[in-house]
Amino acid sequence: MMKHDGTVKILTDRLILRRFTMEDAEAMYKNWASDDEVTQYLPWPTHADVNVTRSVIEGWIQNYANPDFYNWAIVLKTIGEPIGSLGVVKYDEKTASAAIGWCIGKRWWGQGIMPEAARAVLQYLFNEIGFNRIAAYHDKNNPKSGRVMQKIGMLREGTLRASGKNNQGIVDEVYYSILKEDYEKDHNQNIKLIWKIEK
């Protein structure tokens, strides 16, 4: 039985995962949304100016009223501003399954930040909401995203040819997933995470 509780605040060792606010627009635009290298493999275009960013955040804020909307700003504690985002891009209530997606400013690539954020979100979605399967997928030509999926315990399932569309056009997508039973096994043995949820 799933119990949707929306985008709550989650704290990890280095990060605050929280809802976006309108005050985040400048940081989001500067840190990742305006960067063609960050959006290269994403399904949404690089933001032309900060007004586009404001419009996107405004839509997210409206959606926070829905208990089944999950979209976090990834705030690095040392600088106090968002450096990326992570959220549920789709889910199926009947199978208790979801797909998550993320992006982060290139200044913070390769520092283990996205795996840290994603592990915390997995813990929340499995243990608090009741999902049984969480998937993620990436453009075949963007293997760095796949390494994040591997680091959080996801298993590669296969490649769907010409199944996705992003800023490169029609692309092959590589799918990964993790089941709750996989997560519990890995969590007990390998994952040490400092976190807590604040309503």
Image: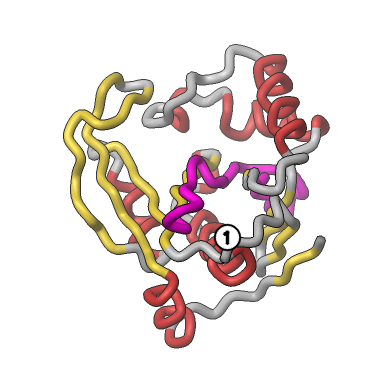
Residue located 71% across and 15% down the image: 51
Q: Please tell me in which quadrant of the rendered image residue 54 appears.
A: top right
Residue 157 drawn at (x, y percent): 23, 56
Q: Is residue 182 left or right of residue 139?
A: right
Residue at the extreme bottom: 189
Give the residues in magenta: 72-97
For the rendered model, the colour scheme is secondary structure
The relative height of residue 92 versus residue 164 in the rendered view (above or below) is below
Examine the residues drawn in magenta and state their main secondary structure.
Answer: strand
**As rendered, which of 44 and 68 lies closer to the eye?**
68
Q: Write down the residue under mark 1.
A: 121
Percent position of residue 174, x then y: 25, 45
Looking at the picture, does residue 39 appear above or below residue 132?
above
Q: Nearer the viewer, residue 195 or 13?
A: 195
What is the quadrant of the C terminus in the image? bottom right
- Quarter-of-image position of residue 141: top left
